[in-house]
Structure formats: structure tokens, C-alpha cells
Image (spheres, helix red, strand yellow):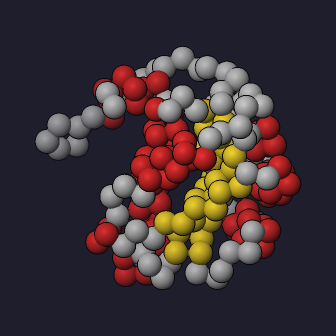
């Protein structure tokens, strides 16, 4: 993967009706689980939702997640606080976020479109997702991913801002 490939990854919120092959989902999850993790704790878990009713339920819990209704797949990305380094939420969030970015890049590399939808730290969203998907107490839903074959193709872009780069000192 080149820097140009990374710049071409964009949030996609509109999808075709084409199903996503299980092998593509598996490859993306393998990439997600290749992410770095504090002390190699790997606290991540993934709830893959292919059924329309499940995606609708997830969309009901996320006010900005209505595109899940038209996606082929939804994934709830979670962290297990009991597996996080020192049982610290901060480590869990860092580890799971790295896995999410790997997941998004792997989906994009396969020609799929996806968008990252925040769940944590909004307590209403966390509680709704935990209840709807029977998540154990130690599992924290961090985000949801809507994905499918893209029906829109946002142009590649950079958000580089030289004023945010500090060399040697602030």
C-alpha cells in the first residue's frame, strides 16, 4: 500500500445492493487484528452484522448511522476492558482505534466503501448498542463501520497542514 492508496481512502456513505463476499470481510478483519496493541494485549472484538434487521437496529442506536440501512454489512468494533493493558480505557481506545484504521484501509484496498461511526464515549449510544447486541459488561462498543460496494466515489485528497508540524520543539 502506497501513501497515495491511503489518501484515496474516504468515507463512503452510499452503497450498491451487491453483497460483500465473506473472504473480503475476513481479509479486512485479519488486517484489523494486525494493528499494534499496547503490550500485545489485542483487546478488540468485532460483531459482524449481515442481516438487515441487525443493521436497522444498529442504525436506530446511532443518529448519524442511517447509512447502515443501505450497507451490505455493519461491524461493531469493541474492546474488552479486561484485556486492555492495565485494564485502562485509554489503552483500549488506542488499540481499538488502530484496528479500526487498519480495517478501513483494508476495505478500501479491496475496492469497498466504508465509514467510521462513533459510539464511544456517548453513553446513550454505548448503552443502546450493548443492550441490542447482548454485549457483556466488560465489552465496550467503540465504533461501528458501515460497509459495502460503493455507489459514490469521493476524490482522493490530503488534509496535510504544515502549520501542525513542529520540528524538534513546539
**Where does the image place residue 164, in percent across and percent down from the top left?**
33, 34
Q: Residue at x 41, y 62 (%)?
A: 95
Q: Is residue 111 left or right of residue 62?
A: left
Q: With respect to residue 6, does 152 lie above or below?
A: above
Please tell me in which quadrant of the rendered image residue 126 appears. Answer: bottom right
Please tell me in which quadrant of the rendered image residue 99 appears. Answer: bottom left
- Where's the C terminus, which quadrant? top left
Farthest top residue in view? 155
| Front-most of residues 81 and 28 | 28
Farthest left residue in view? 168
| Residue 161 visible, this orientation | no
| Front-most of residues 69 and 166 | 69
Q: With respect to residue 140, does 59 lie above or below?
A: above
Q: Is residue 52 left or right of residue 44?
A: right
Q: Is residue 53 left or right of residue 68?
A: right
Q: Residue at x 42, y 75 (%)?
A: 84
Q: How many marks?
A: 0
**Where does the image place residue 41, in percent across and percent down from the top left?**
36, 73
| Residue 19 visible, this orientation | yes
Q: Residue at x 29, y 72 (%)?
A: 39
**Where does the image place residue 104, in percent across and percent down from the top left?**
51, 42
**Where does the image place residue 125, in percent across and percent down from the top left?**
73, 62
Q: Residue at x 31, y 69 (%)?
A: 40
- Where's the N terminus, which quadrant? top left
Amino acid at each position: 500500500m502506497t501513501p497515495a492508496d491511503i489518501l484515496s481512502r474516504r468515507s463512503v456513505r452510499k452503497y450498491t445492493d451487491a453483497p460483500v463476499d465473506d473472504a473480503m470481510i475476513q481479509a479486512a478483519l485479519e488486517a484489523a487484528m494486525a494493528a499494534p496493541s499496547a503490550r500485545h494485549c489485542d483487546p478488540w472484538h468485532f460483531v459482524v452484522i449481515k442481516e438487515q434487521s441487525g443493521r436497522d437496529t444498529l442504525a436506530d442506536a446511532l443518529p448519524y448511522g442511517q447509512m447502515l440501512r443501505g450497507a451490505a454489512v455493519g461491524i461493531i468494533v469493541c474492546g474488552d476492558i479486561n484485556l486492555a493493558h492495565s485494564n485502562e480505557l485509554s489503552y483500549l481506545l488506542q488499540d481499538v482505534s488502530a484496528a479500526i484504521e487498519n480495517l478501513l484501509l483494508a476495505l478500501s484496498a479491496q475496492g469497498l466503501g466504508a465509514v467510521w461511526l462513533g459510539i464511544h464515549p456517548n453513553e446513550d449510544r454505548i448503552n443502546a448498542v450493548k443492550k441490542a447486541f447482548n454485549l457483556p459488561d466488560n465489552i465496550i462498543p467503540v465504533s461501528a463501520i458501515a460497509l459495502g460496494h460503493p455507489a459514490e466515489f469521493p476524490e482522493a485528497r490530503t488534509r496535510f497542514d504544515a502549520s501542525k508540524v513542529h520540528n524538534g520543539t513546539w
